[in-house]
Image: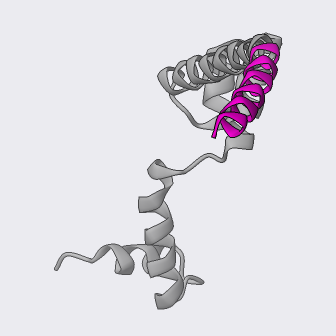
Amino acid sequence: MENTVSETIREAHPQVSAGSTAKLIREVRRAPYRKYTAEEKIRIVLEGFRMEIPISDLCRMDGIAAGIYYKWLKDFMEVGKSRLKGDSLRESNRDEVEGLKRENERLKRLVGEHT
């Protein structure tokens, strides 16, 4: 007769109870779908920047595929680029916004005087 997965685990590891077997199975099934926090992704990408160890070894140690690492690296670089671009646009527009505010106030006064 075929054993179920739970029975097989209990035979191999007698100290495992029925409740913990189900928990272990859920954890094993969920393992390939591990979610990495933003901090973990940043840490991994920055470790790759340091180039102390090859990217393949870094990926193996952290349990990710090299393609995932390069996707995170691309996202990291794009966000940084857009953020820096946004800062320079904000700085260049600041004077323009102040000028437009002054002109708006002047026009409001003119309309008020006219009515």
Residue 54's quadrant in the figure?
Answer: top right
Q: Residue at x 50, y 66 (%)?
A: 27
Q: Residue at x 74, y 21 (%)?
A: 103
Q: Residue at x 83, y 13 (%)?
A: 50
Is 78 situated left or right of 92 in this image? left
Colour scheme employed for the rendering of this structure:
one colour
Instruction: List x then y, in percent, for residue 26.
Output: 44, 70
- Of 9 and 48, nearer the camera is 48
Is residue 106 rendered magenta in the image?
Answer: yes
The residue positioned farthest toward the bottom in the image shown: 18
User: What residue span does the magenta drawing correspond to?
Assistant: 94-115
Q: Is residue 91 above or below residue 61?
A: above
Residue 62's quadrant in the figure?
Answer: top right
Q: Is residue 86 above or below residue 33?
A: above
Q: Residue at x 68, y 42 (%)?
A: 38
- Of 55 and 75, nearer the camera is 75
Q: Is residue 33 above or below residue 75?
A: below
Instruction: List x then y, in percent, for residue 110.
Output: 71, 29
Is 12 situated left or right of 3 in this image? right
Instruction: List x then y, in percent, for residue 98.
Output: 81, 22
Q: Quadrant of the N terminus?
A: bottom left
Is residue 66 rendered magenta in the image?
Answer: no
User: How would you classify the magenta stretch by its main secondary structure?
Assistant: helix
The residue positioned farthest toward the front in the image shown: 114
- Of 107 and 15, nearer the camera is 107
Is 41 situated left or right of 102 in this image? left
Q: Is residue 105 above or below residue 88?
A: below
Q: Quadrant of the C terminus?
A: top right
Q: How many marks?
A: 0
